[in-house]
Amino acid sequence: MKHIISHPLSNVLAALLGGYLFTWGFISLAITGSVFSGVDFHTAEHGALLIAFPLYLLMFFWIAVSQRFWLSRAVSFIGGTLMTLSAWYLQATIVQAGV
Amino acid sequence: MQTGNTRQAMAWLHTWLGLLAGFVLMVCFFFGSLSVFDREIDRWAIPETRFDPQPMPSYDNMLKGIFEKSEPDVAEYNQLMPIYHDPAAGDMTPRTELPPDEYWAYTTHRDPVLRMGVGFRVPHPAEADEHNHIHGNLTIDPRDGSLVPDDHLKIGSDWFYPLHYSLNLEWKFIGYYIVGLAAFFMLVALISGIWIHRRIFREFFTFRPAKRAQRKTLDIHNMSGVIALPFHFFFAITGLIIFASFFYFPVNSTMLKPLHELSEEIEASHKGLPHDRAGIDADIASVDAMIADAKHRWSERGMPGEVGFLMVTHVGDLNSYVSIYRAGSDRVALVGEGIHYKAATGELLREDPPHSFAEGAAEFLTGLHLQHFEHWFLRWLYVFGGLLGCVCIATGFIFYVEKRKSQHARAGSQGSRLTDAFAVATVTGIVVAACAMLLSNRLIPTDTSGKGDWEKIVFCSVWGLTLLHALWRSSPVARAMSNPAWREQALTITVLAVAAVIANWLTTGDHLIKTLFTERYLAVAGTDISLLITAAIAWVSARKLAPKPDKSLTRNLSTDTATREVGYE
């Protein structure tokens, strides 16, 4: 895919959105997963948010400068969506159980 | 960027995201630096509060009465009551009849005055599960309980400080998002900057004053960027972390809200602190006795201290409890070692246990950013680190323009001209606006209604004028020359800063000999000295920027025209 020519601005936009979605999915899943494993919500939230920005930066750079155009976008957008949906499902399970 | 190499892509990110974010980051860094001494600037701006910091006054003898007399803010009531109230339950409860639900009082080792607030509950809320509070905040002189007028703006803590994280743009919290995006772009610019400067160690020691302006500027940009790199990185990322759960990744109030609420209820039951009101009226026992007990418990733990934050939850209800937090002036982390008592009886309900590693790390990082600790040398290092960030951003602007202005001039492009004008308004313009605001604070009579609002108008108007001035004077940049607005605004800073110091002397009698020697008051002396140093730096800069006579013309033209300012129009 190295022949694809894209404007830097579109790469930055993709990196911002894709990186954000991936990070959102990651922290949501990290929090719900931790709570499911018995960790206190706020402890899980603090831990996830400490990792959030380094992870966002990593994803941003990967999408913005990567030679693997489609792979970086697929991982960020599809991965982010899947993690978000998983977190949603896990939350529903925990809330339903009431613990 | 995919088609080029990684270094080119990083250079693109560094240049363009750095430039775009730079206009916001300059505001964040400059006013963030001033915020290190926000309370001291408050003392300068409100002369009647120029006395020594005070401990938390007696609740039973002073605060209780003030809390009970306080009322909801008129503007907040008018804005929020129609949203919070359930119209099906009848008419809205009149403002002065809203019952209090929460009291708080807050002070630090740098505060002579005490900030207090009441959260009033809405009796018939549209959404009962929400935190339906309408607030009434006030500031008092803790020596006698008298009120500090609301329209006397705390320029340091209520204007400069929020400017650095919200740009004071409250509509839909847009300012927080702009600053957040700029801080993220700053992290990108820092990392991409390290990537493109492969000889970073050598560049750290490189300064070539004899070279032309573009080269010198780049050297200063690299040096200031590298010397304070950990500081810049740390402040950008901790600033983002502080607001992450509220604005940037608000999972707990959006997608994970059900889980968050469930955990809050479970947590409340574990803590023994009632989550809701019981609906049964009850009086409050002696809070002073609870404070004495809390201090005793802190001493027993080997950390004696004063009260920094006091809160009463579910006021007037059987489930009401009093939370007492220790002032954190002797440590970095923002922990309060909270102790909670049942309000009706004074019975101990809970002592907060040590936090988990993740919470402890977050508290440490937040504390390091907010620097509530009492360590003056470190506070000054924060100021210098922040100002070094300003230097890095400003030289970045200048390098961008210097590198491109000849090319743009040949092509007839206005890019450099506009960038330069915005840079002038962002670099010198904010200093002009800040000095003008301080001067107006001393010139507007104390009894003027809405004095603080007038000061805000002065700040915004002057800042706007600096941009207009920079744009008006920018035409030489389109011909690859310098914008005279840089020098003119530097001179304006000199005049305004000196005038502010003189106005402070004339209106309060607090001149430097008095505040430094005869009746020492370092908050005011420090602000005055900082203004004078600013004036001196601006004066030296203006002299350096003075147009130099062109020697080739001097040789050819008559004496009258020989001194023509060829650098300008």
Image (cartoon, grey):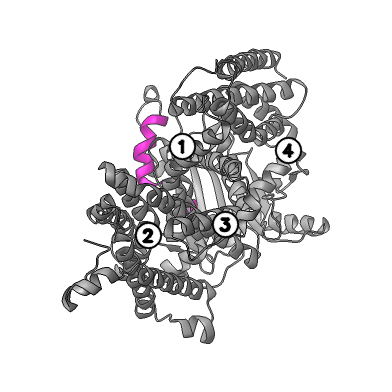
Give the mark nearer the N terminus: 2 vs 4. 4
- Identify which amino acid the numbered label 1 is placed on: Tyr
Q: CA distance from mark 1 to mark 4?
A: 25 Å
Callout 1: residue from which chain? Answer: B
Q: CA distance from mark 4 to mark 3?
A: 34 Å
Q: Position of residue B498 (x, y in %)?
A: 37, 75
Q: Is residue B442 above or below residue B310?
A: below
The answer as to whether the residues below labels 1 and 4 share one chain is yes
Q: Position of residue B162 (x, y in %)?
A: 46, 50
Per the image, label 4 sits on a secondary structure element best described as helix
B190 or B446, nearer to the observer: B190
Mark 3 or 2: the one toward you: 3
Q: Is residue B243 above or below residue B45?
A: above
| Left or right of B569 on screen, residue B124 | right
**Is residue A79 visible in the rendered structure shown here?**
yes
B438 or B74, nearer to the observer: B438
User: Disc 4 marks which residue?
Assistant: B358
User: Residue B427 is drawn in which quadrant?
Assistant: bottom left
Q: Which mark is residue B223?
A: 3
Circle 4 Cα neighbour tier, 10 Å, few/some/many (<14 / 14–19 / ≥20) = some
Callout 4: residue from which chain? Answer: B
**Is residue B283 visible in the rendered structure shown here?**
no
Q: Position of residue B313 (x, y in %)?
A: 60, 42
Mark 1 or 3: the one toward you: 3
Give the mark nearer the N terminus: 1 vs 3. 1
